[in-house]
Image: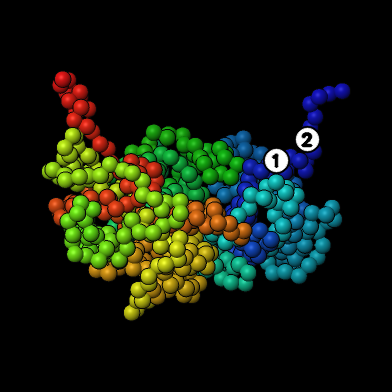
Amino acid sequence: MSIIQKLPSDIVNRIAAGEVIERPASVIKELVENSIDAGATEILIDLEDGGCKRLTVRDNGCGMDPSDLQMAFESHSTSKLDTAGFREGMFGVGTLGFRGEALPSIGSVAEVEAVSRTPKGEHAYRYRLDGQPPEPAAGEPGTVLEVRNLFSRLPARRKFLRRPATELSHIIQQVTRIALAYPGVSFLVTNMGKRSLDLAACDTLRERLGQILGADKLENLIEVAQPGDENSPHLHGFISAPALRRGDTRMQNFFVNGRWVRDRLFTAALRAAYKGYLIPGKHPLAYLFFEFPAEAVDVNVHPTKSEVRFRNPGLMYPLVYNVVSRALEPEDRSQEAADDSGSDAKAGIEQAALDFFANPPPSARGASTGGSGGSIAGAGWSAAGGTREAVEERRELPEVESPGRVFQLLNSFILVEEEDGILLIDQHALHEKILFEGIYRQLLEGDVVQQKLMVPEILALSVEQAPLLEDGCRLLGACGYEAEPFGEAEVAIRAVPELFEGKRRKSRVAEICQEVFSWLEREGDRYLSDDETPELLEQRLRALASLMACKRAVKAGDRLSPEEIDSLLEHGDLAMDPRNCPHGRPTMVRLSRRELDSSFDRK
């Protein structure tokens, strides 16, 4: 008996589904791309539980007759590529799909029903994967595809689905990417009867970006363009001015012939072009579109077509780098950027000084300041105050007794001369740890003092963050903010924690709250659960305290006055364990006189 056997078609389709269908957003991507290829100008997406229970995609495209409707669910059946086209070079196809895998793959792992009608058809036809031929049904011209109970036939995969809010966020991100490439198509996404995304058809990419980002961010975008020739693609799109940046690369989008793709060459070139304009850890926004001749790009590289191969990959890095660099450096913008950078840095240092050093605590060296135990945040807390039992005893640490001379090095480190050596301190890491201990203690004890705002601050969320609105407000509430939904994609902040915001500092409410929502996008599934445990609660509070401490701490590059340096050292002496920052990095390095002598071959 033969050992090697041919797999049944249903097993083949389930294997293909594992490559193409990862979550509800993957299904939406495949179905919406089919709608685009069918010439649709209106696409409606309706969801239940973020698409985990049900998702429906309705379009006004060309529709299918009964024979095509049934054939569409057969493996490797497609209207977008014929045999001649394949032989002549399928790798340059001009459609979003061509493999013929999506519908049979979806049908193998979920319950699928399709209703379709051509413009000239007398009525629509309904088709289910039950072995029966299509049957007449009511319906408008176009196609409606309904998918229920995704992964019901793959229980192991279903366990990996996230919370409905997270899955909805991924769907919004996927639809937004497609909408950027096709501004002439309108998109409407609803979940549980509520509108989650509504993008009307428009004429230009700039208009589409305005719908997605809002007018404020649109003003900080720079248009770029580079005509193509027989050797290089046409490039156009928008990049952000240095003033508009993020802590991640989620809003860097690259499109090849209308298809969103991932490519490390593009990302690396963009990062290199912004070098000197952005501090480490900050990333620009980018929406760059490349138009290639059909034979110059191979899209048959990845099952989801999210990766491509170029005939001349060596051209891509310099193309992106040069176009972006030129856009960032015109004379008027160059001077403006330099002025903004200088003023922002000066304002940041002044604000940090007001907030960080306004109320120094009683000196750990015995010199009384006459203060009331004020903090680095200027909000009346001491880093050595009461904490949980696990950290109630302060660790025995070497103290900085009667320091000699103190210097700031490279606007990032503090050098303290000691009796038997020197102490090098990372100013950001030490400040971050001090803030972390105070913030974490107050969050843990639920004793956060609030300060009411005379006028509520309104925080506008991105379209991807909008599904996380309720979770975000709940997290902000746990952090001491009084936050509530304000419409479908905005948050009203009515009170802030004094500990985090400070009394004498210009408010950074929107910035910190935005950081919480960005953290929720990245880490929400890890720290949020319907089954709350003390361990999960503690992990979440530590993560939030670390996030806010890092955001509020003075940065490497901030010049500090002698008084500010002394206050930082005093607060460091009061910390429970100032040796490591919340991320585990050391805050200080001590070099003894013996180690210094040995380094210079002294006896």
Residue 376 locus on image (x, y percent): 27, 59
Q: Is residue 323 visible?
A: no
Residue topped by disc 1: 15
- The quarter of the rendered structure image containing the N terminus is top right
Q: Nearer the viewer, residue 268 or 426?
A: 426
Type of residue at label 2?
Leu
Report the side of 601 relative to 532 (left or right).
left
Q: CA distance from mark 2 to mark 1?
A: 10 Å
| Residue at 30% across, 66% down | 379
* Residue lying at 19% horizontally and 42% vertically, measured from the top left: 415
Q: Considering the image in quadrants, where does the C terminus appear?
A: top left
Q: Residues within 10 Å of mark 1 (few under 14, many from 20)?
A: some
Using the image as rendered, state which of residue 260 and residue 256 is in the foreground: 260
| Badge 2 vs badge 1, beta-carbon distance below 8 Å | yes
Residue at mark 2: 7
Q: Where does the image place residue 32, in percent across and percent down from the top left?
A: 60, 57
Residue at the image position 45 percent from the left and 41 percent from the top: 263
Nearest the camera: 319 or 577? 577
Q: Residues within 10 Å of mark 2 (few under 14, many from 20)?
A: few
Tell me the quarter of the picture where residue 398 sits: top left
* SS class, disc 1: helix
Tag of residue 92: none
Q: Position of residue 124 (x, y in %)?
A: 75, 65
The quadrant in which residue 530 appears is bottom right
For marks 2 and 1 on the same chain, the one whose residue lies earlier in the sequence: 2
* Number of numbered discs: 2
Residue 337, placed above or below residue 312: below
